[in-house]
Image: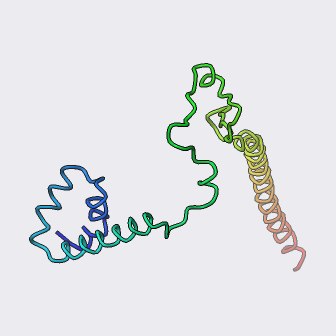
Amino acid sequence: MQIDHYLKSGIVEAYVNGSATPEQAAEFEQLLPEHAQLQQALEQCMARFGKLAWADEHRLVHKPGMFNKTAPLPGTYHAVTEDEADTGSREDSDFVAATVSSPTIRVHKYWRGVFIAVFFLSKLFLGLFIYYLVQYQSAVKEIKRLEQQVSTQAAPVAR
């Protein structure tokens, strides 16, 4: 197993954070005594998490002001009734409910006509190209035939 790839997968952070699955945690704990790199990465990660926790505890990491204003205090949550859940109306609502009018993107509806027009115009131009190509080829054949006819008629006159 490549330890560098294993470390870059984020398993150490997941293990320290407690978000690793039991299988991942068991595998990590099994590999931990065998590889010094894993032990060193675990110590560094725990130190980083410890510094973050200490900084947050001592308010060295300041949260943006909007979170301090809008975050409700524990125990002051508004219970949503069934009527509010159905209508989505609340007096102090700061969010806009997203509604979907159709499963396709709106731009596609407008471009569909453009694509159809371009398709038919391309077929029209293709037909005109083929028509004039055939006309050109028949004109070239006619010119060659007339040149041969003129050359055969001009030959007896040249005597």
140 with respect to 30 (left or right): right
Q: What residue do we see at 66% from left, 36% from top?
A: 97
Q: Quadrant of residue 139?
A: bottom right
Q: Judge by depth and name the residue closer to the eye, 56 or 9.
A: 56
Q: Answer above or below: position of 154 versus 86.
A: below
Q: What residue do we see at 72% from left, 41% from top?
A: 112
| Name of the residue lying farthest toward the top | 83
The percent coordinates of residue 22 (x first, y second) are 20, 49
User: Which of the image's four quarters has the C terminus?
Assistant: bottom right
Q: Answer above or below: position of 40 versus 144.
A: below
| Name of the residue lying farthest toward the bottom | 159
Q: Quadrant of residue 11?
A: bottom left
| Name of the residue lying farthest toward the right | 157
Q: Judge by depth and name the residue closer to the eye, 145 or 113.
A: 113
The percent coordinates of residue 133 (x first, y second) are 76, 57
Q: Answer above or below: position of 142 versus 120.
A: below
